[in-house]
Amino acid sequence: MSTRRIVLSRSAAIVGAAATGWLLPATAGAQSAKLRVGLMLPYTGTYAQLGVAVENGVRMAIDQQGGKLGGREIEWFKVDDESEPSKAVENASKLVQRDKVQVLIGTVHSGVQMGIQKVARETGVLSLIPNAGAHAATRALCAPNVFRTSFTNAQITLALGPAMVARGHKKAVWITWKYAAGEEAFEGFKQSYPAAGGSIIKELGLPFPNVEFQALLTEIAALQPDAVACFFAGGGAAKFIRDYAAAGLKDKIALYGSGFLTEGVLDAAGPAADGIITTMHYSDSLDTPRNKQFRMEYAKAFRSQPDVYAMQGYDTGLLLVHGANAVQGDMEAKPALYRALESAVIDSPRGRWTMSRAHNPVQDIYLRRVENMENKVIGVAAKAQADSGAGCRMG
Ligand code: PHB
């Protein structure tokens, strides 16, 4: 072997070592360590399947980019938050303080989100919200390190009122679980429905995650409204749809909802769901190449149909990949990281969306109708809908 050849192969070896991180200076060396990602989601209880769908979506987006973030491999940490607000601060702290995650992805339940928000504000950890619509997270308690890829609870129901009145349903009963998500969904409905000419004749509720609907359905039958509007989700939503039909209300009083009512539950609800009209920032039937490709790949990877939660998880993964790539995996480069996340344009299965100044999606809201166990798009209820972000001051 000639001398020249030896020199060349040595330098090639050095390039190889640099690429794997052995010879890099201390700070860059830290970036070649695995990036620590925490998932705090419900894996038990009425929202269990929502948590699984979010995680599937996150992993799928990252796998499609070679399974790395900004060139770094990933170490995952997981906590089942049980949709239990009283354990939220402790669970989030475990991930941030004990496991030292650099990104915390979570969660589904608005009450639990408020615990995560507290920990995110105190520690500065990057917090990506893949579902929970709690208003404060992107309003009064917004923070530079918190980004939401889903919605605010009122963002969905602000589009619902006019759609109901346009169908001639002007006298409605509202029903929900009595916790932040249901109450904030009602806020949007209370604003949009009367403004369009409808009147809310009664507001009904039960504690989360109670599913004893019978007495309330009897009350609805006696009130004889034109329509019922609601917020329910997950396992409880499937039961509400079935109980509504079993009580003989399905063909008498039109059922509307924030679109979560019919997400991921259509198999469980069966024909009882046919005809329900909802508003939502996604629909299975969106006829775009992007959505079709997403649905095909998700079904292949997980042997189940994706829903809004899977899509939001997927977008969370896309956003994280975008941010991490922009700083080449250096998650401590916070100003550059936040700038990248703030200016991201996410090419989502729901359609392209951008971040509002308060870090919540600006997005189209679709009108959908359940037909043959599918959420079919029947119109656009609101174009480029933004949440008010009221009270948000980025510190
Ligand atoms: C929430 O608690 O914010 C929440 C939960 C489930 C949904 C939507 C919102 O489907």
Image (cartoon, rainbow, N blue to C red):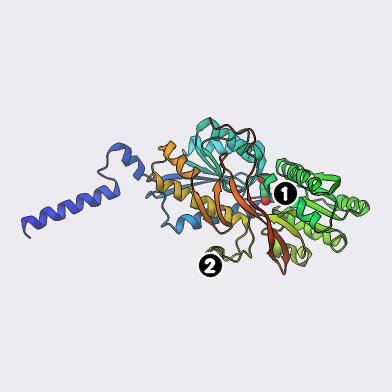
Name the residue type under label 1.
Thr
Residue 248 image point, x, y percent: 88, 62
Percent position of residue 279, x then y: 70, 55
Q: Is residue 328 visible?
A: yes
Circle 1 residues within 10 Å: few <14, some 14–19, many ≥20: many
Q: Identify the residue at image location x=56%, y=38%.
A: 92
Position of residue 130 measured from the top left corner of the image (x, y, whole percent):
58, 48
- Furthest-left residue in this view: 2
Identified by mark 2, the residue type is Lys
Looking at marks 1 and 2 on the same chain, the residue that comes earlier in the sequence is marked by 1
- Residue occupying image coordinates x 42% and y 46%: 324
For label 1, the residue is 157
Q: Secondary structure at mark 2?
A: helix
Q: Quadrant of residue 184?
A: top right
| Residue at mark 1 to residue at mark 2: CA–CA distance | 33 Å
Give the quadrant of the N terminus: bottom left
Q: Judge from the rendering whether residue 56 lies leftward or rightward of residue 4; answer left or right.
A: right
- Seen as rendered, the residue at the extreme right is 222
The residue that disc 2 covers is 300
